[in-house]
Image (cartoon, rainbow, N blue to C red):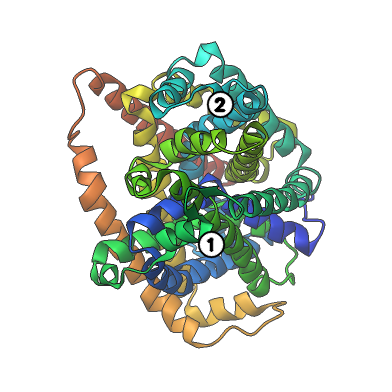
Amino acid sequence: MRKRERWGTKLGIILAVAGSAVGIGNFLRFPGKVALNGGGAFMIPYFISFLILGIPLSWVEWSLGRYGGQFSHGSAPGIFHSIWKNKIAKYLGVIGLFGPLVIFFYYVYIESWSLGYAFFSITGKLLKNSNPDSMKKFLENFQLNPLNGAYYFFLITFILNFYILYRGISKGIEKICEIGMPILAILGILLVVRVFTLRSGERTVVDGLNFLWMPDFKAILEPKVWLEAAGQIFFTLSVGIGVILTYASYLDRKSDIALSALSSSATNEFFEVIIGGSFVIPAAFIFFGEQTKSIAEGGIFNLGFVTMPLVFQKIPLGSLISFLWFVLLFIAGFTSSISILQPAISFFEDEFKFSKSKSVLITALICFIFSQPAIFFIDKGVVDELDFWGGTLALVIFALIEVIIFAWILDIEESWKELHIGADIKIPEFFKFIIKYVTPIYLIIILLYWVIKNGIPLLILKGVSKENLPYILGIRVALFLFFILLIFMVRYIWKKRGEVL
């Protein structure tokens, strides 16, 4: 039997999981959510969600992943089947392959924008755009005419992702995270320090921080704010994607997972709350004042790729600061994108018994083909479509399945013992109740909210123009066929083994 890879160090796995969680959203999505949902008051439901949703799901995924690893399974179909001897289990695990791959189809292109903008910053081309209209036009030209430059940055980013994955768990992912995460921390701290020295007229960073963190306690009474906070925690910790399952499967049986899950989650919160909450919105407020709220409402792309370059124009060494900003975004995106590919690679290695190089090549071909619509039809609503099916719906459903398997199928008492094998800490007993009852109920509420708010309008094609309709229907058909293909792959493997289908 082929020997599975292992992480080199405990720090390596912690940084890798943290690297998966720390992404572009930490520096753009989080401060925007805070600014629009009660400021400092938003942090009350945010941290409650962290305790009853984020941390419990992290423990669930670390436990299930390590458990499946002892049976040489590193992806959800095999892990679920090893735990739950029901013929449906492996097919439910297909969602854990589908979601991360669909996310990568569009995420890698967005990630490559940061690389392109870092290049345009250091060459001075970006900051020649002196007003919001010209900066927006620059971004639109970059996005909508990929063959004029964006596609080349996509190719570089795409190749770098698969090169690191070809290097493997310890020599690839672990090494890049051991290098990238400290660099990310240093860049983040440098940028925050620079923001703390900014001034525009009478406005200083204190005014910017007050704008972001001044609590509006009325917001706590709004259900939407609680759901937004839960959603932010859900996505920022990379739970429900299947990545932590796969990463944990490469651990030794007696490796600590209880403290490691907490450590990686705390690392993510440092980048999100301390660095992400001290840079973008405060810097924008210093120069744009009360307009910052409408800027935040404009979305993370405008905030990161339009507003921030305009801020950098107004300060000394702006091109250098802009370069550092986009390098930070690129590193954050890169450590996330390599992680969401590993479940598919593990699937081909562990279930099909393919070599590392063959598994990487097959995954690369699939991703390259399916990435093209996100690149060339971004203005047709394709990215929003991919984000809903892969980056929202699949994640919440998969997380709900995970917690049910952990707390109800495997049984909470057995799962609790599994979680504490090799543990460096003793987890408080009340988390049993949270994991068994509170977390799944919370996930069901989130799922229903998203389906009603986004799913139903999306399913009935509300607001889709006749021009975009063929593209939306086309991508839906492609995603459906891709999901069916994954199901048939799983069926083929189990049939070949002579096991229950």
User: For the residue marked with disc 2, what is the amino acid?
Assistant: Leu
Q: Count the numbered circles shown.
A: 2
Callout 1 touching callout 2 (CB < 8 Å): no
Residue 164: name its quadrant: top right
Residue 175, given in percent of the width and then of the height, sits at 79, 47
Compared to residue 226, the image places residue 201 above or below, namely above
Q: Which residue is mark 2?
A: 127
Residue 448, given in percent of the width and then of the height, sits at 25, 58
The label nearer to you, 1 versus 2, is 2
The first of marks 1 and 2 along the sequence is 2
Find residue 273 and name its label: 1
User: For the residue marked with disc 1, what is the amino acid?
Assistant: Val
Task: Report the Cα–Cα distance between label 1 and label 2.
Answer: 28 Å
Q: Secondary structure at mark 2?
A: helix
Compared to residue 379, the image places residue 296 above or below, namely below
Please name the residue shown 25% across and 66% down the image: 223
Q: Is 25 left or right of 448, judged from the image as shown?
A: right
In the image, farthest residue toward the bottom? 429
Compared to residue 425, the image places residue 397 above or below, namely above
Residue 150: name its quadrant: top right
- Residue density around tag 1, few if under 14, some if 14–19, many if 20 or more, within 10 Å: some
Front one among 8 and 286: 286
Please name the residue shown 79% across and 49% down the image: 170
Find residue 481 and name its label: none
Q: Is 19 left or right of 6, judged from the image as shown?
A: left
Q: Secondary structure at mark 1?
A: helix
Front one among 445 and 286: 286
Compared to residue 480, the image places residue 289 above or below, namely below
Please name the residue shown 67% across and 41% down the image: 349
Q: Is 44 left or right of 279, judged from the image as shown?
A: left
Residue 116, given in percent of the width and then of the height, sits at 60, 26
